[in-house]
Structures are given as C-alpha cells and as structure tokens.
Image: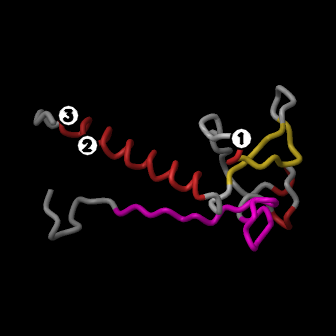
C-alpha cells in the first residue's frame, strides 16, 4: 500500500453521535435516533435499525417500541465505551476480511 497518496483509497470515520436516554451521558436523550426525544416509530430518524444481537445487556437501551416477539426494541449509545470499542473491533475485523478478499480477487494471496 502506498501511504504517500489517497489515490484509489477510501477514507472512513467513526461518528459516535448516537445517544440514549438513561445512558449516563450529559445529553440523557435519544440523540440522532428519534425526533423530539420521543422513542417511538413516528419519531424515528434512522433509515435502518441496527443489528443489536452481539451487544450485551449493559450496552442496550430500550425504546418504547417492541419487536415482533414483543421484546423491547433496544438501541445502543456511543457514550458507552464498551460499545465504541466493539464498533472499532468490528471495523478492524472487516478491514482484514476486505483486504484478504481483495488480495485473493487480484490473485495476489495474503
């Protein structure tokens, strides 16, 4: 990899701006998830619901909505360091996978 140029490279960033009521942050609100701090379907501001299956009970915050199995629909907060570390681990794992797949596709191997 040529570290002297950004040509043919993608720049990624992590924007930890999602917060939840009860997450311990100074915001104490559903920042970037819902309008007007109302955690219901009519106030939802995201296009896709995140996959929460790998997050621990200490990383999720229940909204007023329910999943089809009647469990509370929960979301994460970027104020939780454990969650942010998990997100960075996912990005690191994905990067390795992509590099491996790209190298194999180019016939170079890893």
Tell me: residue 77, above or below residue 92: below
Q: Secondary structure at mark 3?
A: helix
Please identify the quadrant where the N terminus is shown: bottom left
Q: Which of the two discs, 1 and 2, labels the residue nearer the N terminus?
A: 1
Q: Are marks 1 and 2 in contact (CB under 8 Å)?
A: no
The residue that label 3 is drawn on is 105
The reply to whether the magenta stretch includes residue 93 is no
12 w.r.t. 72: above or below: below
Number of residue marks:
3
Secondary structure beneath dot 1 equals helix
Image quadrant where residue 66 sits: top right
Q: Residue at x 42, y 49 (%)?
A: 91
Image x and y of residue 41, in percent: 84, 49
- Toward the bottom, the furthest residue is 26
Image location (x, y in percent) of residue 39: 85, 54
**From the viewer's perspective, is the residue at label 3 or at label 1 nearer?**
1
Cα–Cα gap, marks 3 and 2: 10 Å
Q: CA distance from mark 1 to mark 2?
A: 32 Å
The image quadrant of residue 78 is bottom right
| Residue 57: image tag | 1
**Mark 3 touches mark 2? (CB < 8 Å):** no
Where the C terminus falls, by quadrant?
A: top left
Mark 2 surroundings within 10 Å by alpha-carbon count, few (fewer than 14), some (14 through 19), many (20 or more)? few
State the image coordinates of residue 8 (x, y, percent, origin top left): 23, 59
Q: Which residues are magenta?
A: 11-31
Is residue 10 found left or right of 27 in the rendered image?
Answer: left
Q: Nearer the viewer, residue 94 or 28?
A: 28
């Amino acid at each position: 990899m040529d570290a002297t140029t950004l040509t043919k490279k993608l720049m990624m960033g992590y924007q930890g701006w999602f917060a939840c009521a009860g997450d311990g942050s100074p915001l104490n609100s559903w920042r970037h998830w819902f309008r007007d701090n109302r955690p219901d379907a009519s106030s939802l501001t995201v296009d896709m619901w995140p996959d929460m299956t790998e997050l621990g009970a200490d990383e999720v915050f229940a909204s007023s909505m329910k999943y089809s199995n009647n469990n509370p629909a929960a979301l994460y907060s970027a104020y939780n360091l454990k969650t942010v570390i998990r997100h960075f681990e996912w990005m690191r794992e994905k990067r390795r996978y992509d590099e491996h797949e790209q190298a194999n596709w180019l016939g170079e191997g890893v």
